[in-house]
Image: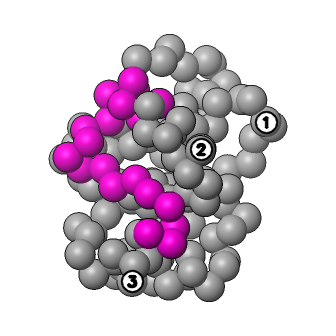
Amino acid sequence: MYELRSYQNDLIQRITKSIQKGHHHIIVQSPPRTGKTVVMAEIARKTTAKNNRVMFVIHRKEVLDQAKAIFKAQGVNPNLATMGLVQTLCRRVDKLPEPQLILIDEGHHALAKVMHYLTRHYNNW
């Protein structure tokens, strides 16, 4: 398990507070090499620890393999986590379990048609 840095814990606390205030679409911006994937893995771990499903959406295969390793190391329950390339997840959307949380890597892609299709498929979006 990764030991989070203080700024990562602070970021997670700010995200949690934003969710508690009723915000459902949160964009996190952080400089390169600050551990955004580790932060998302910790959020996913906390989500699956509460027996909730999480979906992690990414755009490049090389980065997906790396993210899967980080999520595993962080202790995310693999039975409650769906991770994949946006195109693959869109093709399988009718067969996938509905997540309570969707994490999107490279959030600036969130408004792309394919991403819009994926997120709008689920009622909680």
Mark 1 residue type: Pro
| CA distance for labels 3 and 2 | 24 Å
Residues at discs 1 and 2 in contact (Cβ within 8 Å) = no
Q: Is residue 23 magenta?
A: no
Identify the residue at the far right of this view: 31
Secondary element at tag 1? loop
Residue 78's x, y, as percent?
26, 42
| CA distance for labels 3 and 1 | 31 Å
In the picture of the structure, the residue carrying the numbered disc 3 is: 121
> Which of 53 and 113 lies nearest the eye of the viewer?
113
Q: Please indicate whether residue 46 sits to the left or right of residue 103 in the image.
A: left
Please tell me which of labels 3 and 2 falls first in the chain.
Answer: 2
Mark 3 residue type: His
Residue 60 vertical placement versus 12 (above, below): below
Kindly identify which numbered label has been placed on residue 63. Answer: 2
Q: Please indicate whether residue 89 sits to the left or right of residue 99 in the image.
A: right
Mark 3 vs mark 2: in front: 2
In the picture of the structure, the residue carrying the numbered disc 1 is: 32
